[in-house]
Every structure is written in C-alpha cells, then in structure tokens.
Image: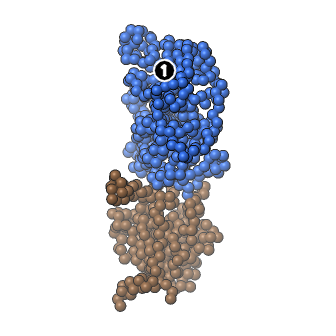
Chain colours: A brown, B blue
Amino acid sequence: MTPLATLTEALASGRVRVIDLTHTLDPDFPVIVLPAEFGQCARFRMDEVSAYDHRGPAWKWHNLSMSEHTGTHFDAPIHWVTGRDVAKGSTDAIDPAAFVGPVCVIDCAQGAAENEDFILEPAHIAAWEAEHGPIPPGAWVLMRTDWSHRHGAAYLNLKDDGAHSPGPSPAAIRALLARGITGFGTECVGTDAGQAAHFDPPYPAHALLHGAGKYGLQCLRNLDQLPPRGAVLICPPLKIKGGTGSPLRVLALVEETP
Amino acid sequence: MTQPLAPPPKKNPARRTPVPTLPPAIRSRAALGLALAAAQGRFQLQTCTDCGAVQYPPRDACHRCLSTALVWQDQPRGAQLLAETTIHASPDPYFRERLPWRAGTVQLDAGPVALAHIHGDVARGARTRTALMLDRAGQGVLVALPEQETPHMQDDPALRAMGTHPSHRRILITDARAPEAPALTRALLDAGAAHVFLGLAERWRPFPAQPTLEAMKNVTLHPLDVTDADSVIDLAGSIGGKVDILINNARHIRPGGVITGTIHDASDALQKGALGLMRLAHAFGPALSARGADGVNSAAAWVTVLPAQSLAHDPGFAASTAAGAATRALSLSLRAELRAGGIRVLHVHAGPIDDDWHQPLPPPKLAPNALARAIVQGLEQGLEEVHAGDVARDIAERFAQNPALLAREMEGGA
C-alpha cells in the first residue's frame, strides 16, 4: 500500500483519529485586549444577509467580520515587527508544507494549575526530550496548559497590572528555534505569557519566533487529547493577500493505541 | 388629592394587549411650534414682532395686526382657571379609553385665553401653572397644573397618559460599562422604576462596578453587546416584552481628526452608535410599539444618548461626532416610526463627559451623575430634547440661532 492509502485506510478503520483543536468562532469569545489608546482586535461578528425570507427566499447566509487574530488563529512572521522582512512571511506566501507536520506536546498543565504565571523554560524542554526523545526539525511544538478549560474573565485573567497567563520564556523560544521547529502554539489568547511585556526581549514568542520566520498558533483546545509525540498537525490559515494571520480550523491526526 | 398609583398587578396573559390609540395628531405648520417648545419643556407662545401681541392658538398671521413676523418666545407660565368640566363621553377612540377627562379654559398671564387639559389637583377658579407638554401623539398641548407641587401629582391620570415617568416601569440601560450607568441606575430606582436591566458587553473583561450593581435590589445584569446582532436578539427574546423604557447609552468616543483619526475607531463608533441603534430597534422596537397602551406600566419611551457635538461636529473628535450625527439622524427616523405606538424618543445630548477620553480637556465637563439626572428628569417631564451640561446647552443655543455659524465656530472645538 502507498503511504496515503495506508493513511486513508487507517482513518476509515478508526486506527487514526481526527482531533479538533479549534474553538468555535463565537461573538462572545475573548480576544486580546491592548492598552485602550491602541487599535483593538475586532471581535467575531455575523450579520445575517437573508434567512429563507424576503431578503432571499430559499437560502440563509451571513457576512462575517473579525480580526486576522480572532478566535483560534495562526500568526504569520509579518505579524511582528521583527518578522517584517521575512521572505514569504504572509499567510498567502508561506510554503503550504509548513501547515502539515509532526507535533510535540509539552504538558505544562500541572504547572499552570499551580501558577497562573507559569513560564516554560529550557529545563522543561530538556526534561520532555529526556522522556520522549529529541524534538525533530520541522516539528510544531504545542504548550499544553489546560488553559482552554477556563471561560469568560478567567480566560484572559486581566488584572490591574495586566494579564496573567502562562507562556514561554525567551530562553525557551531560543531553545526551540535551535531545534529547527516550524512553529509554536498555546491554549491562551496569545503565544506569549500574560506578563511577557516585562521579559527581555518583550513578547519572545512573537519577537524571536517571527523574527526567525516561524509561525504561531493560539487559542487551541483539546491538547489533552494529544500524545506527547507521534501526532500530525494540520493548520492551514486562510490564503489572505498580505495576511498577518488568520482564524483557522486546526486538526490533529492521532494514532489509536490498539 | 391625586391618588398615588399602585404597582400594577401581573398582566393577565389571556387578555389581548390593547392596541395603542393616539389623540388627534393633525396640526398646522404653525401649531408645530407648540410641539417644539414642549419637546424641550419650555413654555413658548407665538409673539408678533410688529405689535407685540401674544397669541394662542398659533396662526400664520398676527390676530391683531395681520403681520406675519411671528416668533416663538418664552412666556410667563401663570394662569387663572376660568371654567372647567369633566368629560364623560367622547367619540374619539383615544379619549373614550381614558374617560373621565378634565378640560377647561384658562386666562394666561401672557394674554390669550386658551383651552387646556386640567390637572385633578387644580381647584375651581384657582391660579394655575401652565405647561406645554407632549401628548401621546407627540403634539404640544396646554396643561394647567397646580400652582404649587401637590403630593403624587405626577400620578394624575392625564399626566400619566401623556408622560414617560419612570415610576413602576421596567427600564433597560444598554451599556452598563458607560460612566453614567451606576448613577443612572440609582436615579431611576429613586424615581420609582420597578426594575432596571443593564446590558453588559464582554463579560470576559473586568467590570469594577459589577459587584455594586449586582448588590442593588431590582437590578439585573444581562449579556448585551449592541455590535452583535445575536446578543441583541437573545436579550429581546428574553425581556423584550417587559422593557417599558429603553435607554440606549452605548457610544464609542475617541479623539482624532479626519486625517489623524483611524478608520478602525470610526468603524467602531458607527457600529456601536448608529448601527447599534438599528439592531436594538429591530429587536426591541416591535414589542415597544405594541405595548404603548399596556396599562400603568405601558411601554413609554426610547432614550438615545448622543454627544452634544452631534448637532455640528468637533474636529478633535471627528469620527465620534460624525457617528453621533448619524445616530441622531437614525434616531429622528426612529422617533417617527415609534410615534404610531405612542412611544416617545428622547434625545439626551451630553456635553464632554468627565472620563478618560476627555481627560486632557479643560472644564466644564459633564459629571456622570449630572448626565444621569438629566436623563431621568427628561423622562419625568416627558421631553424629547435634553441638553445636559453647559457645553451641550451652549451648542444647542448656537445651533438654534445659526447652524452655519456654529459649524464655523466649531472649527476650534467644543
């Protein structure tokens, strides 16, 4: 059998399962909140054009509006100032091979449960590799925190001194870049920690990751259904001309243990 | 003595809701001046600039010298009740449903003798204080009130029939996050509102006033974002049939000119202001219109809170005031649409409010408490146009005198 025939047979038999890592696009889903004087991330909105009525008797449809960075979404290199000159750095220009690849899941759920400002450090990556083997070049690395189980105000966790949510340290991002990853993803509203403005450099999962031409995924869910390694991630963003990112459906293919 | 209104019993769900009827609404162009004065709570009569005669009812020419140089001027409110009667039979559907009804003639201190509605606490032959008030059809009518305040005088059946008093009514404030929302909630409850519903957008963002509001009796918070059609429809589906007064205070104020401002802010200002009003009107308008005669706590009013500069423009807040002008235009059309249901549309023009977005501006700025008071007073008096704060009043006066001159003067900002 060819590799693809093997895959489709495994999908049909259930030996390979498809996991949805995406939140529903919902007008009330939180978006990142910036200082009030900056431009803000547009919320997801649906405006009904017709609903089997005088505006269109046999069909229902909506006009949509949102930010490129609303809901479960993809960050392209040109999203950040450090990635502004990256070749093929917009969603329409990225090599589509980057959108399908192996995925490593680093479980930080316990740390995030104990500390809402939990920071992923190189030591956690080293410990993961000691147990599961090296992170392969071209892999997507996802930081599991179970943060997607939070709802409403607890999700953004905004306080007077800003957001408090887990994320990677600058050293951790450098360590992942050294391994040649394709991208990094999280369950929080952004790839960076809530307090990452105070890191050096600020927002390492944007500044370092996108500066190196790598990609981001955020607002993921169901990471608790993925194995630490062995799954395949599928995350093609919309092909937006000059797009800095895009809401998308993120899927994972997981082998069922017999 | 006016009998105080008792809280209305629960509605009998088996009975048909009465269809709103209106008092006679046809007026001459000249007579519309009464409505303009009544809309602002002013007592104005037609005055001849040639001979000085004050006349009532309004006409196209002076009744004494036939001059057409007539202007509307504020007049003394005092009057003497000459004759009065209580009407027990009427062929008019509106008055038939509200009999008995008291009417009579008054000798106005301003000169004319006029036919007027008579408050129940005005004794035969007494001195009275006359007011121009809007009736259910939105026309200005003369009402003879007691010279001094009497207990529960706002509960007089004629005043209740004409007015939009918050007492016993259930009121929706669309934006709990607006700076005036807590003070407005308190002021409405103090005025006797039965319940205040507050719309809260984006519950996932911090809202420091939430514990205070949630602790208040007869106050509930509900998910509502006027930029999201579904949330508006969901709330109307839940409480639309018991919102007697809707106060739309959702607005998006940001500094910036046409060149220096952002499309993003302009879009947000239009989405939240003008289009938010349309979404609310789609969802809440039909039930409001249908409930204009629904007993003591009938639907009564829609309030649109506007920036004072919506009458002109403010180069320092170009998009916000343009959105305010668009909101005002839509709200004027809404006023015409809701009129048939007897629902009054009150515009409250707010001067620059003392909040983060006006922080570098010098005084006078409008305190949120003062805006709340102005809204409640406008409802208590049944007005259509309220200008809250010194800046708003100044803009309104200049707008009335010469809109083109105001536009030129506004180049320097409000």
Question: Mark 1 falls within which chain?
Answer: B
Quadrant hosting residue A149: bottom right
Quadrant hosting residue B127: top right
Name of the residue lying farthest toward the bottom: A1
Q: In the picture shown, does residue A50 fall above or below B99?
A: below
- The reply to whether residue B9 is in sight is yes
The foreground one among B95 and A14 is B95
- The reply to whether residue B313 is in sight is no
The residue indicated by pointer 1 is: B44
Quarter of the figure that contains the N terminus of chain A = bottom left
Q: Secondary structure at mark 1?
A: strand
Instruction: Identify the residue shown where x is 48% and y is 30%.
Output: B94
Locate residue B41, reporting x and y percent: 52, 26
Is B133 displayed left or right of B330 in the figure? Answer: right
Name the residue type under label 1.
Gln
Q: In the picture shown, does residue A54 fall above or below B35?
A: below
The foreground one among B396 and B297 is B297
Total numbered labels placed on residues in the image: 1
Locate residue A26, reporting x and y percent: 47, 61
Instruction: Identify the residue shown where x is 50% and y is 13%.
Output: B113
The foreground one among B69 and B155 is B155
Q: In the picture shown, does residue A255 fall above or below B71?
A: below
Is B55 displayed left or right of A167 in the figure? Answer: left
Instruction: Identify the residue shown where x is 54% and y is 34%.
Output: B164
Q: Residues within 10 Å of mark 1 (few under 14, many from 20)?
A: many
The foreground one among B12 and B241 is B12
Locate residue B181, reporting x and y percent: 58, 43
Instruction: Identify the residue shown where x is 61% and y is 16%.
Output: B124
Locate residue A232, reporting x and y percent: 44, 80
